[in-house]
Image (tube, rainbow, N blue to C red):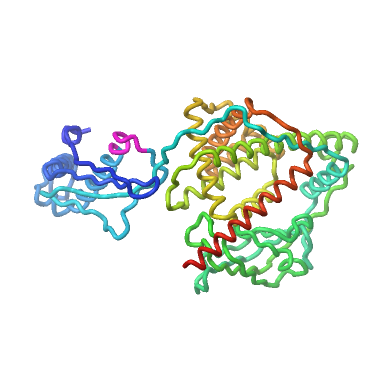
Amino acid sequence: MSNATAEMKPEVKVEDAGPARKRITVTVQAKDVDARLENGFGNLANEAALPGFRKGKAPRALLERRFGDMLLQETRTQLLGETYGKVVQDHKLRPVGEPSLPEGATEPTLTRGKAFTYTVEVEVAPEFAAPKTDGLEIQKPMFEIKDEHVAAEIRRQGFRFGTPERITGPFQPLDRMLCTAKAWKNDEKEPFFNMEKALVVVPDTVDEGKGSLLGILVNDLSKHLEGRKVGESVTIDTVAPENHEREDLRGAKIRFELKFDDADRITPLDSATLADRMGLETEENLRTQVRMMLERKRDGEQRAAEREQVSRHLVDAVDFPLPERLSQSQIARNLEMARMEMLQRGMEAEEVETRLAELRHGSEEDTKRRLKLFFILSRLAEEMAVQVNEPEVNGRIAAMAAQRGVAPAQMRQDLERAGRLSELALSIREQKVLDRILDKAKFTEIDADSWNAAEDKRREEAMAKANSSKGGSKKKA
């Protein structure tokens, strides 16, 4: 750091700009601007090599003509970064997004001999008192793995390891098509999505016709796909959820156009062949292995249900203002956290994508509650001094790899390629916080059917409340 930088003392003003949002105004004095520019020109004069001049001997006037504008931009960028970072540190701000210009403001310019002033706004983590967490009353859903569950899982694994056969149609559940896919929004002439060889799968019968396209849930997808043939095209109209991570798609009318170029139908392996493929020798060994796997998955889902109850308690127990604008990055982070939690529970990739599509269609209230939970768990993690180390991350990766039948190194590579390792670590930290709370909880057992019925009723009531609120807002507008 240069002496000019070290001695620079800009004027700083930090004020509230809305719920969990700060407005920062910084003024760098003219003398400090000039000192920084002089320092930049000095470095440039020593390093620049221009035709006809030895290194470091080019005239100042020539350097200013050639590099003056560039140096002004570089100095402006440096001052913005350095002063903003120092304000965040000195005022102990906790940004949860990138700074942006206030509405209607223009980019600040840097001029020699003049003070440099800029104003930005940034969303910050809200301040609140952490809720009490001791002695919560939690229901433990009890579920018995029966023979029909084992048979259904063996069927699913048979399809997973089955033999694909090229078909032309008509398509039926679980057929896989490669399509030329295009998508338009709000009657725009140019598509916002255009892709060859996009994979589309006909929903299974247990999915009740629902499936996702580009992460958007289509409730009657089966109706549009079943019975079609290679070479045909289909148009599907739907509406993107109000809480899609892409702001430009929120609430937009979406039109998909799919042209079916190729299709495969999976011939599932029978149980004897599947047992041999998995090195289990007999069908009885296969059933035993599958039952054990389902029991592990059940235990994971049971723990997830317990954590969800704690999460609901935490969100309801404390109130604080959230950032007014749910940014794309925040919503995307919520979805990635949900993705990691489901993958760790052993859910298949296609099932995860369908569930994520359903989450995107959740109400704005659901999105706010998930964001609120993120801040609460982050605060509790700090208070409990919860950390996540590399062996814990590696252990979770190994467990996920075993569930998918791939090597841990491949699983890590896939997560790194998708940029999801940080979400995995954050997910582990949040689960550790919830588990510490559960260690002090009071449990009551409840049968799975009663639990599921209660959860369905809770979701229906939440959906009705959200729809009522949405309708009231439109009427008011």
Relative to 168, say whether 331 is above or below: above
Q: Nearer the viewer, residue 394 or 429?
A: 429
Q: Main secondary structure of the magenta part?
A: helix
| Residue 447 belongs to magenta span | no
Measured as percent of width and height from the top left, residue 47 is found at 19, 41
Q: Residue 421 at what x, y percent from top left?
A: 54, 38
Q: Position of 42 compared to 244: left or right?
A: left
Give percent across and percent down for residue 238.
61, 67
Question: Total label count?
Answer: 0
In the image, residue 196 sits, relative to residue 327, either above or below, namely below
Q: Residue at x 36, y 50 (%)?
A: 18
Q: Quadrant of residue 147?
A: top right
Give the magenta range: 86-93
User: In the displayed structure, would residue 350 be above or below residue 187?
Assistant: above
**Residue 56 visible in the snapshot:** no
Where is residue 97 shown, x and y percent of the image? 41, 46
Task: Identify the residue at image location x=64%, y=59%.
Answer: 217
Direction from residue 338 to residue 84 in the image, left or right: left
Which residue is rendered at x = 72% and y = 66% of the image?
A: 225
Q: Residue at x 68, y 51 (%)?
A: 350
- Is residue 241 found left or right of 140 in the rendered image? left
Query: Looking at this view, is 355 or 190 the one in front?
Result: 355
Which image quadrant for residue 280?
top right
Magenta run includes residue 87 = yes
In front of the other: 33 or 179: 33
Quadrant of image for the N terminus: top left
Report if residue 102 is visible in the image: yes
Tell me: residue 203, above or below residue 474: above
